[in-house]
Amino acid sequence: MNRDTICVQGGYHPKNGEPRQIPIIESTTFKYDTSEDMGKLFDLEADGYFYSRLQNPTCDYVAKKICELEGGTAAMLTSSGQAANFFALFNICNAGDHIVASSSIYGGTYNLIRVTMAKMGVKATFVSPCCTEAELNAAFTPETKCVFGETIANPALTVLDIETFAKAAHAHNVPLIVDNTFATPINCRPFAWGADIVTHSTTKYMDGHGAAVGGAIVDGGKFDWMAHAEKFPGLCTPDDSYHGITYAEKFGKEGAFIKKATAQLMRDFGSTPSPQSAFLLNLGLESLHVRMQRHCENGQAVAEFLASHPKIAYVNYCGLPKDPYHALAQKYLPHGSCGVVSFGLKGGRAAASTFMKHLKLAAIETHVADARTCCLNPASSTHRQMNDAELKTAGVPAELVRMSCGLESSADLIADIAQALDAVE
């Protein structure tokens, strides 16, 4: 089916007399007639549910829809986008292993890899998304287990050259993991360009209404784990905590990654999405294809207005012909990127602060990718502990403003921005 149709009808297909909308199975446990029946579930010999910390029917219906949208073979929901990225990485990384990651990624994910996973013994090398192939290949070590990047980085809005990063990953016999949150599968399907695992913060465009925090992991089903068994013992050797099952042998390359992440990581870490949150996410997914078009239209209109304004120093938006990532966007995102625009004011920190104070329609929030336009000056909020030099090094200079264009009239958004800029001296 076309992605538009999958948004509306994918994942759940009711039978005769069953609910038309996905049912909310709000239950922690599930009843079975015999211990033998339940034992088959614990042995991973049968499909089904026994405890919602691992799996729940409502969540699985929605995960299946996201899997279909991305063109994958298996998927799971998590309690947040951060949980999705952690599970995707930790599913194949052990103490002593190494990750190659783009340096232009969401700050929370950067901290997860650079600080938290380092405490677990997993090291990382960060490379510029604009690095040469030689620089990218030089980042690998014998202990490298995966490569990580974002289709469109938050908040830098750089565009990842997915094919180049996939080529390098596969040359070193490891998978490429791509966070596709900002583009969504409506505007980019990373699997088509060589990615192996895709993650999402479903909190953003997929939900689209600021209603529920969540995440998702999708497996493309093409990476041959057993062909590189020595690199991936967690998938390719018996799991003593699950009766000696070897995931890659039992579930194949199409299902091993998600099965292990569910049976092992979700069991032990419990980053479980609620059925209610999954239900709300599905409501958002039903209109994703319509909303993304409007988000992109508004983002483009706002970016073009800002680019021509005398008080604006620069605009980051790959839909602008002069943007350094425009050519990559034309390749990977020909139908639009997202509704997020970042820009700098010529007056620096003071100008950014004045601008933010005078916005009337755009709300000041830490959120992004919502139906309602929201705005953030990192220097005065999320990164306020840094001085101007530190902010510049981190890629979020003091004058930077990130605006997530919602679904309102673009004329109203531009009018709001214009009157706020008028207040800047």
Image (tube, grey):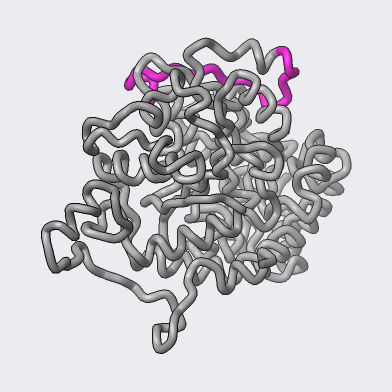
Does residue 214 show up magenta in the picture? no
> Residue at (69%, 35%) from the top-left corner?
162
> Residue at (49%, 55%) from the top-left corner?
202
> Can residue 116 be seen in this snapshot?
no
Quadrant placement of the C terminus? top right
| Residue 391 higher or lower than 44, as above or below | above
Res 287 → quadrant: bottom right
Q: Which residues are magenta?
A: 116-134
Q: Nearer the viewer, residue 166 or 416?
A: 166
> Residue at (25%, 53%) from the top-left corner?
53
| Residue 188 higher or lower than 233, as above or below | below
Provide residue 13's location: percent of width, then percent of height: 49, 75
Q: Nearer the viewer, residue 51 or 85?
A: 51
Res 115 → quadrant: top left
Quadrant placement of the N terminus? bottom right
> Can residue 326 be seen in this snapshot?
yes
Q: Kindly give the residue lying farthest to the bottom in the view shown.
A: 17
> Residue at (24%, 53%) from the top-left corner?
41
Does residue 133 show up magenta in the picture? yes
Res 160 → quadrant: top right
Provide residue 305's location: percent of width, then percent of height: 82, 54
Provide residue 343's location: percent of width, then percent of height: 71, 42
